[in-house]
Amino acid sequence: IYEEVMPCNRMELSQRLAVEELITTEASYVHNIQLCVSDIRAHLQKKQLPDLDLEGLFSNTDDILHISRQFLKGLEATATQEHEQLLCISALFQEFKEEMETVYKIYCASYEHALLLVESYRKDPRLQEEILETLSATVPHTGASDLSFFLVMPVQRVTKYPLLLGKILENTPASASAYPALQAAVRAMAQVNANINEYKRRREVATKYNKAEHLTLRDRFARLNTHSIAKKTTRLSRLFMHEAGIVAKMEDKEYDSLEEKFQCVASSVAVLKENVASYLGHLEAGTLACLWEHRDRLQMGIPIDEGPAQQYRRFAEYLHCTVFPEFGCGWRPQVRLVWAIKDYLCLQGPDMFLAGHVGRAAVEHRMSEMGSVTYDEEAAMNTYLAINALLVAELPRFNQVALQLLGQILCSLSALQHELAAQVLHQAEKELEQMPHGRVPLPSFWKMVEDTLQQSGAQLRSFCQTFEMVTPSPVTQPLNPAEERKVLSLVSKHGPDKLYQVTSNISGSKDLDLTLQKGQIVALLQSVDTKGNTNRWLVDAGGPRGFVPAGKLQPYCPVQSQQPGMQMPALESSTERRRHSCVSPEAPGPQVATFTPAFQVVAGFSFAARSPQEVNLQAGQPVVVLEPHDKKGSKEWSLVDVNGQRGYVPSSYLVTVPVQKPMGWSLPV
């Protein structure tokens, strides 16, 4: 009987020791991580060393410490369970496996970078001295001579969990009720380590692929050989095959959804960049307009009397020299951030998509045709799969963070705009008190305003009647600067008669289909697809080319407005700068009549001459612009001929209108 009992007791004792080892080593591990975060990192932060990358060194140790504390608390609580302790330990590992995988895979993926930092700091005597002084001051009992002593602990701990569980399993009888649960826990932690290794491998592949190399031309030629040329030729041919539709489009709904969101974020950032630049430009131009007008009047010898005009000039000068510079200081960091996000999304993003998806489609197509691939193609396939898997795993988080960042930027810009408005209003109220009508009783003031508005309204109605007699009402919506540049490019390539506008959002679902937003401008290349279908047109979207439904396109006529003194880029020749044509393409669709209207310059507002150098104008009166600037080159004033009289008038008072009303005028709404 003694001989039968002894092995059982020995196994139970080993099992108990293995459980104690798990709990005690976990407590020691948590204590060391706590020292690393609370003592070592905090001490280095107080030194404020600019060359020390603490985030790169310690990565997400805060998250690891948080999870490990909770896990240790659960382990210690199992000690009171006695016979159910093994089941509780197994369940605890199952409960924490996903959280452990999430935090440890981030740390392990950045561990190599942390070691490179430690190695670089060893070569810097000043930094190494500061690090050693920190270690001796915070953790002298450990005898650590380097930060790597603590940095390796999370990597070692996560790989040791399967071993510790396996040791408990070895000393647990197969007939025990906790045996299957322990087996499942061992498999779960082994899978966690496998997933961490796979994630680390994917990150290394993606980093290597996307790593920017600054090589001279000689170095690039030195790298050329038969193998590298063949490799690059193969990759280029795959890209052409995919773009030409020879390689079928991959059906991956999850990836397509993520890419669509990414492109939406990139487009939003690009639009925000254009809008911010336009807003700042208009803001500055609005304050400079008054200052320029007064400066030009002084240079022309026109006296400026003291009164509302002079007061308004001082007010505008105060805004331009004091308020707006302070406002610009608050905007600059936000604007730089928008610029950085836009450059990253628009320059680096598409390369990753191209590598992770197009290459994968090409290799899989070859594999399906040939039944096998070469060693290089298999290696490329593994690279594409790694990048694609990393994109699918990380793009949701990236999109979410990008949207949050954009939201915060918009909130900051709105707050700055609110502060600017409050400052301007406060200063305007102070200036208003000094105005001639500042102390007029309110009823009298509103009566004066009403009379002025009625008089201005009558002038405006008269001008509108005159204007409508010579030109139809424009219905084309204005484009932002980016769209204008794209339209000019399309017109120069294909002509204005090939332009169409998207009437509703288009989501590409077939091979070579384009995804377009409502309002985008495209150029028609062919009014049929490769199978002769006239309901599917081939268009140029200002870069990408593909097919779109013909029913979602309508002719678009580019209307160019030209103020005196402004120069528009010529589309065909300098003689056609002030003409445009709206010609319907011969393809099926709504028809637009062809016409080529001539233009003339007329007075948009009445102007009374205030010096011999100026000339009177009546609203709607035709004028001839002799020079779109004054003698000093300022474009705020134009030299004109009005009924044989020559003189200067404000350029902003002039408008360009067509003199010929086309027959069958029809523009897209």
Image (cartoon, rainbow, N blue to C red):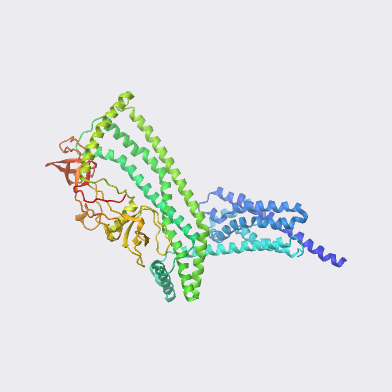
Residue 216 in the image: state x and y as whole percent: 40, 66
The correct choice, above or below, for 329 with respect to 536 in the image is: above
Is 549 in front, or is 3? 549
Indicate left or right for 323 with 195 as reference: left
Residue 366 in the image: state x and y as whole percent: 46, 73
Residue at 57%, 64% in the rendered image: 198
Residue 17 in view (yes/no): yes
Q: How many marks?
A: 0
Residue 637 in view (yes/no): no
Snapshot quadrant of residue 531: bottom left
Quadrant for the N terminus, please: bottom right
The correct choice, above or below, for 237 with respect to 189 in the image is: below
Indicate left or right for 400 with 186 as reference: left
Residue 349 in the image: state x and y as whole percent: 44, 59
Residue at 39%, 37% in the rendered image: 421
Residue at 34%, 56% in the rendered image: 553
Residue at 43%, 54% in the rendered image: 264
Is 376 in front, or is 226? 376
